[in-house]
Image (cartoon, rainbow, N blue to C red):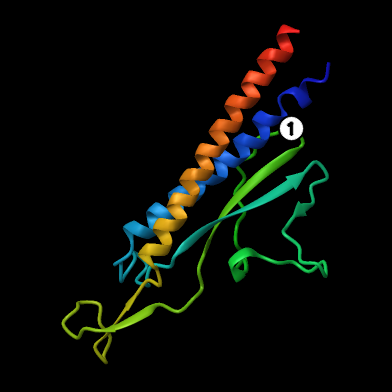
């Protein structure tokens, strides 16, 4: 009996749980820094996004591809040069690599000359984060997490039944 196939549902769902947890973490960080005008390095906080990438046994990264076989990303976001890819793998022939990238869009500006972080023109630069969009993404990540838990429970029930045969 090939146990890799019996337990593949656990593998797939655990990759989904890992990715949804990373999404929740980045969304939470974005919401917490909604009004952060200056980080420890003196720049405006940039919105972060978790991006899943799958690596197979061959070692080739399988990115999302467009119909012309060009690299494509969801949300039109591109990986900045030198972006480290941190691995959080789960085995069974495929590894999920979740990397966090920063949104390179321009920060929002607001006129507030009394703000301590305002520039010489009285403009304050704020993160380009939309609270409503972040909350929608959080609900989506939460539902994705719940769906993967349901899938794990179904895989567990099927594995249990297959062992009783």
> Closest to the observer: 98 or 84?
98
Vertical comparison of 69 with 126: above or below: above
Q: Where is residue 46 in the image (x, y as percent from the top left)?
A: 43, 68
Q: In this view, does 121 lie to the left or right of 94?
A: left
> Closest to the observer: 160 or 125?
160
Q: Where is residue 64 in the image (x, y as percent from the top left)?
A: 72, 59
Q: In this view, does 136 lie to the left or right of 93?
A: left
- Quarter of the image for residue 87 reads top right
Q: In this view, does 123 lie to the left or right of 2?
A: left
Q: Quadrant of the N terminus?
A: top right
Q: Which residue is drawn at 21% across and 83% down?
A: 112
> Closest to the observer: 9 or 103?
9
Give the tally of numbered discs: 1
Q: Residue at x 66, y 14 (%)?
A: 160
Vertical comparison of 72 with 94: above or below: below
Residue that lies at the very extreme toward the top in this rendered image: 164
Q: Which residue is drawn at 67% across and 36% down?
A: 12
Vertical comparison of 123 with 159: above or below: below
- Quarter of the image for residue 135 reads bottom left
Which residue in the structure is indicated by mark 1?
92
Q: Position of residue 72 (x, y in %)?
A: 70, 67
Residue that lies at the very extreme toward the left in this rendered image: 114
Q: Which residue is drawn at 49% across and 51% down?
A: 140
Q: Position of residue 24 (x, y in %)?
A: 45, 48
Element under disc 1: loop
Q: Quadrant of the C terminus?
A: top right
Q: Residues within 10 Å of mark 1 (few under 14, many from 20)?
A: some
- Quarter of the image for residue 154 reads top right
Residue that lies at the very extreme toward the bottom in this rendered image: 121
């Amino acid at each position: 009996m090939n146990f890799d196939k019996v337990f593949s549902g656990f593998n797939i769902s655990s990759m989904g749980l890992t990715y949804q947890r990373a999404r929740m973490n980045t969304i939470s960080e974005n919401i917490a820094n909604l009004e952060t005008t200056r980080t420890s390095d003196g720049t405006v906080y940039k919105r972060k996004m978790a991006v899943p990438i799958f690596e197979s046994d061959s070692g080739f990264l399988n990115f999302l591809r467009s119909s012309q076989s060009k690299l494509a990303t969801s949300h039109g976001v591109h990986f900045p040069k030198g972006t480290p890819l941190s691995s959080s793998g789960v085995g069974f022939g495929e590894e999920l690599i979740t990397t966090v990238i920063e949104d390179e869009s321009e920060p929002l500006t607001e006129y507030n000359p009394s703000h301590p972080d305002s520039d010489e023109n009285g403009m304050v630069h704020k993160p380009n984060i939309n609270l409503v969009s972040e909350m929608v993404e959080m609900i989506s990540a939460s539902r994705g997490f719940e769906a993967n838990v349901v899938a794990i429970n179904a895989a567990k029930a099927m594995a249990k039944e297959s062992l009783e045969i």
